[in-house]
Image (tube, coloured by chain):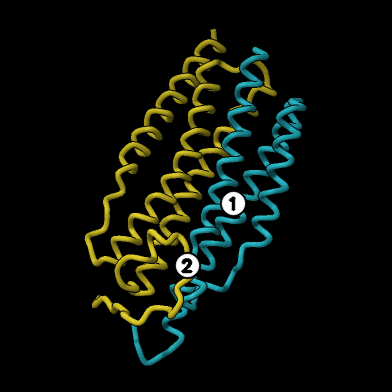
Chain colours: A yellow, B cyan
Amino acid sequence: MQACRYRAVVPEDQRRPRSVYSVGDEPEVQASLANERTALSWIRTGMTLVAGGVALATLSSFGEVPLVILAIAGLASLGGVALGVWALVSWRRTERALRRGQPLPAPSVLPWLVAGVVVVGLLLAGVTAFQAIELTR
Amino acid sequence: MSAANPDTHRAPVDRTTLSWQRTVMHSVIVALVAAFAAIYLGEPAVAVVATLFAGFAVIVGATTPRVKRSQLDVRDPWMLMLRTALVLAASGLVAVMLVVAVALEL
């Protein structure tokens, strides 16, 4: 799609942060909105991690919970908060790149998120299998 | 995409509006679930903090504009995103406090 860039910006641009809106030209509306939606998706992913942490912590109401489960719950919650911060940083970087007509920055946190989810999934599966074997003995 | 139909340009705006609605609903639900979990697990100190944060989340959710995304001068999502990220951080803090409280009781 041909990028449509606007030189005529709002006369007195009051938008914040100034570090974003004071550089470059107004980007294509659709690209800017897509950047906003991507940041919101990152925030929702962070919320899902926090919800998972809360759910794992709630397991303690059923009885004693292995410490590893609580450790995963804590790490998931902290990871969720980190993703929220990342969403803001990523939105700012991408919006600046769009305004300057530069290549978009890579989503560098994505491999870490995938690796974390895989490790946590394997750990939870291992703990569940171990407890199931203990129960059948 | 046809440029002849002016409504064509509404689609990205509406998608963004829906994305905001989903995010705001998510944030309120997660904050409320964290508060209920703290109350249910019998952690009074965490429950008080979690309830305050959940109230903050509801206020943020209720005051987030839904349809003002199409005009240039109001396409300024920074403060809205910052507030939503603060709700997320508050929910994460409650979750960590909950985990620590449960771990101390083990």
Dot 2 amino acid type: Arg
Viewport quadrant of the C terminus of chain A: top right
Residue at mark 1: B26
Between A105 and A45, the one nearer to me in the picture? A105
Residue at mark 2: A15
Residue A29 lies in quadrant? bottom left
Residue A120 bears which disc, if any?
Answer: none
Residue A111 vertical placement versus A10 (above, below): above
Label 2 residue SS: loop
Residue drawn at 56 percent across, 52 percent down: B84
Between A112 and B74, the one nearer to me in the picture? B74
Percent from the top left, x then y, of residue B61?
65, 57
Left or right of A67 on screen, residue A112:
left
Tag nearer the camera, 1 or 2: 2
Residue B11 vertical placement versus A47 (above, below): below
Dot 1 amino acid type: His
Percent from the top left, x then y, of residue B103?
61, 17
Q: Are marks 1 and 2 in contact (CB under 8 Å)?
A: no
Residue drawn at 33 percent across, 43 percent down: A110
Question: Dot 1, crowdedness within 10 Å: few (<14), some or many (≥20)?
Answer: many
Left or right of A33 on screen, residue A56:
right
Residue drawn at 34 percent across, 87 percent down: B2
Left or right of A73 on screen, residue B45:
right
